[in-house]
Structures are given as structure tokens and as C-alpha cells.
Amino acid sequence: MLRFFRSRAEPAPPAAPPDLGEGRRAYAIGDIHGRLDLLRQLIDRIAEDDLARGPAQRTDLILLGDYVDRGPDSKGVLDFVMRLRDWWPDSTCLQGNHEEVFLMAARGDESALRFMTRIGGRETLLSYGAAEEELDTMTLGQLRDWLVVNIPETHLEFIEGMAEKVLIGNYAFVHAGVRPRVPMGEQEARDLRWIRDEFLTFPEPHDYFVVHGHSITADVEERPNRVGIDTGAYASGILTAVGLEGTDRWFLSTVG
């Protein structure tokens, strides 16, 4: 009986491309970080692109998280994405690590508040009406009390209700990434929002092809097991979205 063995030098056959599934189209937007101006531009581009490609049974819009901090209008971004659901019903907002910290700080956690002030939270507080001189003179306790009074409960409840992940076909949409070799159903929320190096350097396939933000790159980062679309919008002026349909993939962005 003859047996055939692949040569050690012969590459393995390529994996099948990820597939969104029949009748589905999806757009995912990377980290916004207070850039309401760029978000408005990109939503318009996505709407035009969706129309130009013709009807689909369903078109999903997924925002990958990190709406607040660093950029100038975090409050405006949250107001906008809360309204976005009214005219794009098949839209989902994921909670990013910055929303997690913001929520904890606004609920009175002083350690989270201290951390928030080091990761761009000053700009968030200014967008909610804080004055520069106030932020320069308030103690941590006073700042905690200011948050309790000035952050709308509707915003906090919206953040609390944000999703951890979205699964469509064999695509997984998450904020930061996934824990390698852990089944999707067993992934922890902290990893989905915070993981970095262990995920970014992992070369093997995951259960799903992962679309993520969280880790800034100068351009879209495409790998065999993932695509990263955080192009540092708050500083670069480039907010990026990926479009998906079947096995097709394309990118839209604002101009820096």
C-alpha cells in the first residue's frame, strides 16, 4: 500500500478565507476617541458605499469601542452613537477599555478615576463641561463628586449595556482581541477589552477571524488570523472602517 507524505519544505495549503455568510454585509469602525467630526464623515462614507453596492438582506454596523478620551468631544460621540441606532437599527456598540475605566470612575471608583486622568480622560471631562482651572485645582475626591453630578445617567446606562463581542459567520468583532487557544464562548470580558501582546503576536488561526481595534497602527494591519483597524484617529485624523461581504473585504477611512 503506497503512502504519500508532504515534503517538509512544501507549504501547507492556505486556509479558506473568512466568510461573513450569505446575504450579509457588515461595516466595523475602529477607535473614535472623541473625534465626532471624523465619525460623522465616516458614517456618511459608509452609507454611500452601502448604497452603491446594492441591497443586502441585512447590513450590520459595528463600532469597536473606545469612544471617549484623548479627542475633543467624547460627550458628543456618545450622544451621536446613541442616536445612531434610530436610523441604523442593525448597529452594535462594543465596550472598549476606555469606556470600562470611564464607567468605573463615574460610579465612584477613585483608582479608576486616577487612571482615567492618565489615559486622556482630561479631554473627556472638558467635553462634559469641566473648566480647565477646575481640573487644575480639584482634589481627586472633588473630581469624583463632579463626575457623579455631571455625567448623564443615560450615558452610563448606555455604556453598561454595550456588547462584548459580535459574531457573524466566522468573523468575530471585539475591541482588543481574544485570548489565544481559548474557545470563543469561554473568553473573558477583560481580555476582549484589554489584551494586547499575547493576541497580536499569536500566528495561528483562532476559532473565528478577528476584527479588532485597541492597538494603534499607522495603517490597517492585516494578518492571516486578524485585522486591526485602530489607525489612531484622535491624533492622525484617520478613522478607519472595514467593509465585509461574503469573503470580500475592503476599507474606508477619513483623510488625515
Image (cartoon, rainbow, N blue to C red):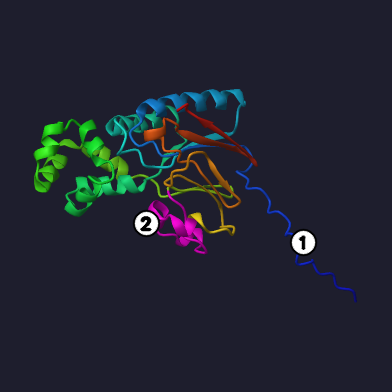
Is residue 183 shown in magenta? yes
Helix, strand or loop for disc 1 = loop
Residue 46 locus on image (x, y percent): 51, 28
Q: Nearer the viewer, residue 129 or 237?
A: 237
Q: Which residue lies under the disc numbered 1?
A: 10
Q: Is residue 189 magenta?
A: yes
Q: CA distance from mark 1 to mark 2?
A: 39 Å
Question: 132 and 31: which one is in front?
Answer: 132
Bounds of the magenta segment: 176-199
Q: Give the mark nearer the N terminus: 1 vs 2.
A: 1
Q: Residues within 10 Å of mark 2 (few under 14, many from 20)?
A: some
**Amino acid on which disc 2 is placed:** Arg
Looking at the picture, does residue 213 appear above or below residue 44?
below
Q: Residue at x 31, y 38 (%)?
A: 68
The residue where tag 2 is placed is 190
Closer to the observer: label 1 or label 2?
1
